[in-house]
Amino acid sequence: MKQSFSILWLIVAALWSGVVPTGAQVNVTQHHNHDSRDGLYVDPTFTQSNAAGLTRDLGFDGTISGNVYAQPLYVDNGPGGVATVIAATESNKVYALDATDGTIIWQQQNLGAPVALTNLPCGNINPMGITGTPVIDLISRSIFLDAMTTPDGGTTKKHLIYSLNLDTGAINPGWPVDVNAAVPGFTSSVQGERAALSIVGNILYVPYGGHAGDCGTYHGWLVGVQIDDPTIVMAWATDAIGGGAWATGGVASDGTNPFMATGNTFNTGGNWGGGETIIRFQPGPIFTGDPSDYWAPTNWLQLDNGDVDLGGSGPLLVDVPGATPSSLVVALGKDGNAYLLNRGNLGGIAAPVASLRVANNSIIQAAASYRTNQATYVAFRANGSTVSTFQITATNPPTITNGWNVDRGNGSGCGSPFVTSTDGTNNTIVWVAGASGDQKLHGYDGDTGAVVFAGGGANETMAGTHSYNTTGIAARGRIYVAGDNKVYAFVTPGGVATPTPTPTATPSPTATATPSPSVSPTPTPRATPRSRPTPRSRPSLPPRP
């Protein structure tokens, strides 16, 4: 018992100080690393001097097959105890790569055929397979993902939610879940799954929106599947048509409740129906309809009519010590505004705690947040070539002030930012991949925006990055970025070697070939398929002057 207490005390002390113990496991199991979606990676090797010497590891293979929109994931204790990078592609293929040399440990290629763009009503991803970033549950050693599939060459479209064995890539028993069959009213042909998945408690949450072009009678959906019993499925959808949950960061969480952003709705008649909003769900998902559990700007109808999605960016949960309130939700919209919301009481259709115009155009991306000795920051992709920051003041109430701004120009491109720090507050570096531009990695001082890493030489170029979807991860002195057909690894001069397999590693079952899935009928969900807002959550706005 004394030994257990000592280990627990060390873990608590490490969390309190923000420093990860040297021997602690490093795992990136979800989009932007944490439930809050902050995109912060604490790694003592990423001093600014080390980061300035970053180089691409040319000995890292990383070869995969298919276009990539999803962020890669990382597990220290992967198959056989080997440090592992997980990558998923639009060809409905999932790979486990050795994190040191990039060779394939296993690959899963039997998740169904992806759907060609010519067989979709609209869109801009071809083919469409796995788009949203998967999520890993380390307790069950399972990878969860959504795959858009067709069993007959494109006539029939199905979203299938899979669980894969982390050690072998085999499909776990009882999976996949056929969303068409499990959720009444859900139509896969008009629904896209572009946002990151999340696990809160024992429930897997999968958000859905439409395809690029807003065709068909799609809705914003949040589907919840119990990870230990996939026959138990619940779902919520917007009452109005539209309101897609498509932001690349997907579902955020405070550890108990999932949070989701929705986009513009159509033909509402002036009655709010779930669009242009940040929603806090009860586990399930269940939407109470209480104003404390959602927020929409007072001009939501104007945003609707202009196709100006609040949901172009997912919710970002930020804590600001000294502020009142201190537990906040940050929302960023295609209207160019940043909003602060009280996480304990979102407020319904109302003014936010604070707002500020922080961009002159649509903000579409996944933001990151971090704290230094100077301030609490939010870093975001302001447009296709600009990374910007703003600060949140520790005041009553908190306010937003503009931070630094770097216009990379010259078609250099800008993906969604992520942040490294040596201890949680010092040596902060904001990283962006030159997505769809120069396709190089760039790093900026978290307090000033000064260039820390300027992209390197020709060897540091990456191919096949995708605009705001592309973001990287940091683990063990390395940065990993996934592009089409390849995962790239970058290493600092003082990089920490990836851990070697331990003799006590979890035994890996022998991989067996998995046939193409024939989905078993899913029992009728026990929960109501759509938890509609109560009447008071759907107020009509007074006529605009």
Image (spheres, rainbow, N blue to C red):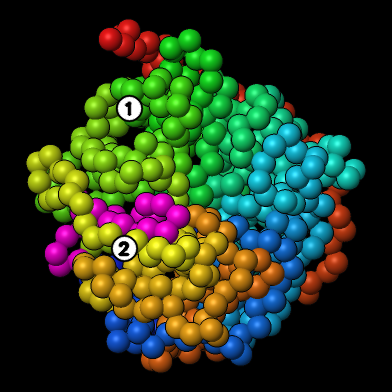
Range covered by the magenta-colored residues: 372-392
Of marks 1 and 2, which one's residue comes earlier in the chain? Answer: 1
Tell me residue 280's x, y (percent): 40, 35
Q: Are marks 1 and 2 in contact (CB under 8 Å)?
A: no
Tell me residue 489's x, y (percent): 54, 79
Q: Answer left or right for 168 relative to 198.
A: right
Tell whether position 389 is magenta: yes
* Element carrying mark 1: loop
* Quadrant assignment, res 143: bottom right
**Which one is in front, 1 or 305?**
305
Q: Is residue 312 above or below residue 470?
A: above
> Which residue, given by chain and number where applicable, does mark 2 sit on?
406
**Quadrant holding the C terminus:** top left
> Which residue, given by chain and number where applicable, does mark 1 sit on?
297
* Quadrant assignment, res 484: bottom right
**Residue at position x 9%, y 46% from top?**
395
Amino acid type, callout 1: Pro
